[in-house]
Image: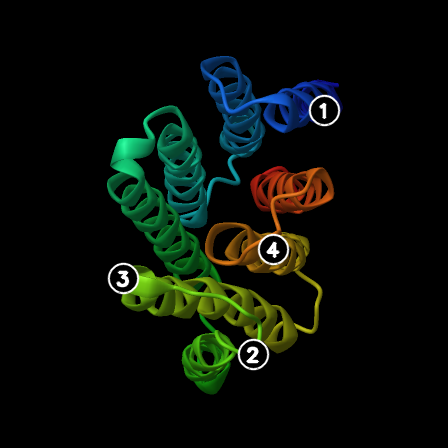
Amino acid sequence: MMYPFLLLCGAAVLVLYIREKIRAFSVRALVLKSVVSALFIAVGIHGAYAAGVRGAMTRMHPFVLMGLLSGLLGDIWLDLKYVFPEKNRSFTLAGFSAFGIGHVFYMTGMLLRYFPSGRPMFAVLPFVLGAAASAANAALEKPMKLNFGEMRKPVILYGFLLFSMLFLAGGLALAGGWRETPLTLMFAGGVLFAVSDLILSGTYFGTGRGRPVDLASNYLTYYAGQFLIASALVF
């Protein structure tokens, strides 16, 4: 019963947060956002605890939990840029760094548990594809009417980590014949995470893309992704 309860609480607070964020960039919005993020960490902790009780704890569990915690830190720092606009660049870099480190934790956990012995290409090729996807994203800067400016290098590096995590989860799931529910959830979460960040890219580096629909779609896809990743520890 705890798992659906945490999901329900997360959805309810997320609605309150999106409503507040659309109205104003405030400390109240930051607090609500932190609560939603704390709830996806709670889902991960619940999953890890249940696995420990069953004697099913794996090396993946602590790394995914650290990735979720990195997400909480990233959420806080990215919203602080609105509370303290004079430190916009510093908080943006801190947020990107936290999320990038989170993806490293996710990938480390997946590789420690699911590395396909004798089939290393399923673990190596995703990083090649991640680099290609990040390069393509950077190449689309002008066609998409974006301006990364001094954040161009951090965006490219972060994109590499983001897309590599997505492709790694998919590659490992494919190597296992899509029979491992945790990997399927990590992949689905990675897809939504990437969609969210593509929307966020337009909000941060484009013009006229901060509409309520943009904010709502960004946070709905992001939090759905994080809750799916956290749920990988439940199943």
Kindly identify which residue carries mark 4: 199
User: Counting residues from the N terminus, which is met first, the one under dot 4 or under dot 3?
Assistant: 3
Secondary structure under tag 1 reads helix
In this rendering, the answer to whether 172 lies above or below 35 is below
Kindly identify which residue carries mark 3: 150
Q: CA distance from mark 4 to mark 2?
A: 15 Å
Q: CA distance from mark 1 to mark 4?
A: 18 Å
Give the image's coloring scheme: rainbow
Residue 119 is at least partly visible in this image: no
Which residue is located at x 64 percent, y 40 percent? Answer: 215
Inspect the image, locate mark 2, and give the three-letter code of the amino acid beneath it: Pro
Find residue 89 and report its image quarter.
Answer: top left
Inspect the image, locate mark 3, and give the three-letter code of the amino acid beneath it: Glu
Q: CA distance from mark 4 to mark 3?
A: 19 Å
- The answer to whether the residue labelled 1 contacts the one labelled 4, judged by CB atoms less than 8 Å apart, is no
Kindly identify which residue carries mark 2: 143
User: Counting residues from the N terminus, which is met first, the one under dot 2 or under dot 1?
Assistant: 1
Residue 178 is at least partly visible in this image: yes
Q: Residues within 10 Å of mark 2 (few under 14, many from 20)?
A: few
Kindly identify which residue carries mark 1: 15
Find residue 112 and report its image quarter.
Answer: bottom left
Q: Residues within 10 Å of mark 4 (few under 14, many from 20)?
A: many
User: Counting residues from the N terminus, which is met first, the one under dot 2 or under dot 3?
Assistant: 2
Q: Position of residue 190 (x, y in %)?
A: 58, 57
Q: Position of residue 226 (x, y in %)?
A: 57, 42
User: Counting residues from the N terminus, which is met first, the one under dot 4 or under dot 2?
Assistant: 2
